[in-house]
Image (cartoon, rainbow, N blue to C red):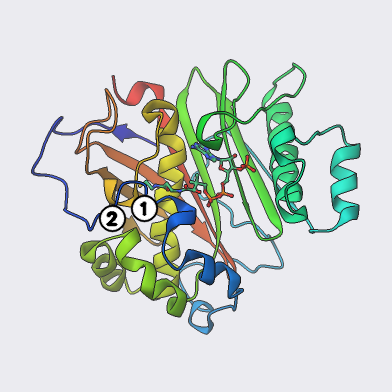
């Protein structure tokens, strides 16, 4: 994937998006997000014939159509129960002290993500002992010379890694499809009118499109975090182009996020989906910008 800085410091390019209070867009501070999650998931009927859905039975995780060969992606299903937790701990993984008193679900998803990361690193040729501490803002501290990303969504964890010589950052995001009735009250916080209009123009179902916008932006956040080094919100990027047949997306930064990431920077990403999940990937290649 390419990331091309265009019109550095171009203040005309960004579309203005509704912005909340600083930090408001942090995932757990999104108004209504908790109730959306607590409400449980119901498969939206309008997704059955959308885009290129993959049969869930064939692959729990949608297959990314344009995965570069220098990336190792591993995904694994998990169940939230004591047997799963014991199996993960028996495999040599350990919970950090900060999660010692976490609920069972958090422990299992954390260790499942680490399990995928360990397998992905091994697959990519990382020889050293596996260690992946929690860093600033919860970002994993990848071994020297490596970059990666972890995501988990109900019952499925995934991790992707690559050598840091090729990438500054990688962002992977796995989301359960968000039903349209739950997406509607969140739209203003996640995107702006132009982004929702794009989904309508493309003829994508509202729930699927909302999940794609949300997931692609979270993947972007994770990919750029190593350079930006702080939280930035959903209003700081615009998903302005998407090719449903290929799953290729283009996002544009709306703010100067870091040296080398001025407003107007174009970032490429990709997404795939099946009847239950959206999987997004955003890469920040080293040779893309200064
Ligand atoms: C951090 C965030 C992106 C995580 O996404 P999520 O959908 O809640 O959860 P996921 O399962 O996909 O990913 C969680 C994993 O992301 C990784 N992660 C967390 N914070 C991270 C960060 N700052 N940078 C990179 N990776 C991070 C961790 O590995 C975490 O799993 P772990 O805690 O078990 O190790 C999300 O909670 C958030 O705060 N989003 C708001 C910021 C944002 O997306 N802005 C949009 C910019 S356009």
The x, y position of residue 65, in whole percent, is 51, 50
Q: Which residue occupies the foreground of this view, 141 or 118?
A: 141
The vertical placement of 192 against 163, above or below, is: below
Q: Quick one: SS at disc 2?
A: loop
Provide the secondary structure element on which disc 1 rests. loop
* Residue name at image x 42 percent, y 41 percent: 221
Q: Which residue is mark 2?
A: 20
- CB under 8 Å between discs 2 and 1: yes
* Figure check: 229 above or below 48: above
Front residue of this view, candidates 88 and 249? 88
Q: Residue at x 52, y 30 (%)?
A: 136
Mark 1 crowd level (few <14, some 14–19, many ≥20, 10 Å Cα): some
For disc 1, the marked residue is 24
Callout 2: 10 Å neighbours few (<14), some, many (20+)? some
Q: Is residue 1 visible?
A: yes
The quarter holding residue 54 reads: bottom right
Q: Which residue is at the front of the view, 40 or 70?
A: 40
Q: Residue 95 in the image: state x and y as whole percent.
A: 77, 36
Could you say which is closer to the camera, residue 73 or residue 133?
Answer: 133
Q: Is residue 9 left or right of residue 31?
A: left
- Quadrant including the N terminus: top left
Q: Residue at x 33, y 26 (%)?
A: 288
């Amino acid at each position: 994937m390419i990331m091309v800085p265009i019109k550095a410091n171009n203040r005309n390019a960004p579309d203005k998006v509704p912005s909340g209070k600083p930090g408001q867009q942090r995932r757990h501070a999104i108004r209504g997000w908790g109730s959306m999650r607590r409400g449980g998931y119901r498969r939206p009927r309008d997704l059955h014939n959308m885009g290129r859905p993959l049969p869930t039975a064939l692959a729990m995780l949608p297959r990314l159509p344009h995965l570069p060969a220098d990336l190792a992606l591993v995904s694994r299903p998990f169940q939230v129960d004591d047997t799963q937790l014991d199996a993960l701990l028996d495999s040599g993984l350990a919970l950090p002290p900060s999660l010692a008193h976490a609920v069972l679900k958090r422990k299992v998803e954390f260790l499942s993500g680490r399990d995928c990361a360990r397998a992905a690193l091994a697959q990519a040729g990382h020889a050293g002992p596996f260690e992946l501490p929690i860093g600033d803002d919860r970002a994993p501290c990848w071994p020297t010379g490596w970059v990666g990303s972890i995501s988990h969504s109900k019952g499925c964890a995934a991790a992707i890694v690559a050598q840091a010589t090729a990438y500054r950052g990688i962002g992977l995001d796995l989301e359960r499809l968000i039903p349209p009735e739950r997406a509607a009250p969140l739209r203003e916080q996640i995107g702006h009118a132009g982004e929702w209009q794009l989904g309508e123009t493309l003829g994508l179902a509202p729930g699927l499109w909302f999940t794609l916008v949300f997931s692609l932006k979270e993947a972007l956040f994770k990919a750029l975090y190593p350079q930006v080094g702080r939280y930035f919100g959903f209003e700081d990027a615009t998903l302005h182009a998407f090719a449903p047949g290929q799953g290729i997306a283009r996002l544009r930064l709306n703010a100067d996020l870091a040296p080398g990431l001025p407003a107007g920077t174009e970032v490429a990403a990709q997404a795939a989906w099946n009847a239950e999940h959206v999987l997004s990937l955003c890469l920040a290649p080293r040779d893309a910008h200064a």
